[in-house]
Image: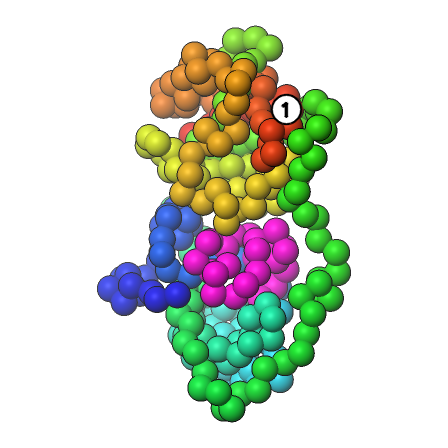
Amino acid sequence: CFSDLASLKMGVRTLSEALQLSDECRVITTGSAPFNIVHTNKAWSKLTGFKFTEVANRSNSFLQGPHTEAKLVERMRAASEKGETTRVRVVNYDRYGTPFYNSIEIFPLRDMAGKLTHYCGVLHGEDIPDGVVPPIDRKPEELFGSTSGSSTDPDEEEETAAAASGWPAAAAGRGAGRVKRLRRGGHVTLQEALDNTEDAVVMTQPHPPYAITHVNAPWCEMCGYTLEEVEGLSSSILQGAETDEALLSELMASVRRGESSSATLVNYKKGGARFLNQAHASGRE
């Protein structure tokens, strides 16, 4: 994973910037201890070997091992407690125990009022020459215990899914009715959407083709895909034989007008299982 040095010099200052599609290895955490993970991107997964659903709501400590420099970890912790940017080069370990040099720069992310809400870590991995740092023997499945998989039975019965919010939330299917406009004040902030761990949430770019920038663990469980599989794609992956393009266009047109809207849609999971999706679409604030 090779970071854009120009981007690193400019820094990542806001949650919106941190969630942009990027070839940089990025991880976003909460803004206070224990700094749990709320987002990783495909490049981060390729570097570390972990999937987002495995590490969501956990701290980054699973990357540490016997040769991780405690002083550097403390430096990162101290800077984060103070809301400061910091950069270190530390020994980390990937999913299978292989060590690598991790040059990580950690940026505090603040809202429009200047309040610290999250941190974004931009990682740059380097191979360690053989024999310098020994690998560790660890079994990935033993790190966190059992995790919810994303496999789906194609013959699964139709189910009613949790509501989805987004930036905006793109969905598809033939609905049980017309698009319903929600009350004023129905908008969600980017922070609220990212920190939502109860509903199935998908965030997209705010312009066509509405490429997916983030999905949370409930969305992955509902739809059968991993974040790494759908990053950069559109929500059309959920469309199928019964997709109602007119209803979808109406839903997205409402979002473009700044309206939060809702519709019941027929979507399709990975593998083709049909399910009802009570989707709430909202532009971000």
Quadrant placement of the C terminus:
top left
Picture coordinates of residue 68, whole percent (x, y)? 56, 82
Residue 120 visible? The answer is no
Q: Position of residue 145 (x, y in %)?
A: 75, 60
Who's the residue at 50% across and 68% down the image?
80
Is 165 above or below relative to 244?
Answer: below
> According to the image, label 1 marks what residue?
274
- Local crowd at mark 1 within 10 Å, few (<14), some, or many (≥20)? many
Asked if residue 244 lies left or right of residue 66, the reply is left
Q: Is residue 135 above or below residue 262?
A: below
In-front residue for pair 78/140: 140
Q: Is residue 43 shown in magenta?
A: yes
Q: Position of residue 265 (x, y in %)?
A: 57, 19
Q: Is residue 74 above or below residue 254?
A: below
Q: What amino acid is labelled 1 in the image?
A: Arg
Residue placed most toward the observer, 142 or 154: 154
Q: Position of residue 26 (x, y in %)?
A: 44, 59
Relative to 258, is 95 on the left or the right?
right
Report the magenta residues as a range: 36-61
Q: How many marks?
A: 1
**47 or 262: which is nearer to us?**
47
Q: Is residue 273 left or right of residue 45?
A: right
Q: Secondary structure at mark 1?
A: strand
Which residue in the rendered view is the most extreme toward the top?
A: 177
Residue drawn at the location 40% of the way across and 43% of the way down: 232
Residue occupying image coordinates x 66% and y 42%: 151
Residue 100 appears anywhere in the view = yes
Vertical side of 21 occupied by 27: above or below:
below
Quarter of the figure with residue 146: bottom right
Which residue shows up at 58% across the image and 19% down it?
Answer: 266
The scheme the figure's colours follow is rainbow
Q: Is 6 included in the stretch rendered in magenta?
A: no
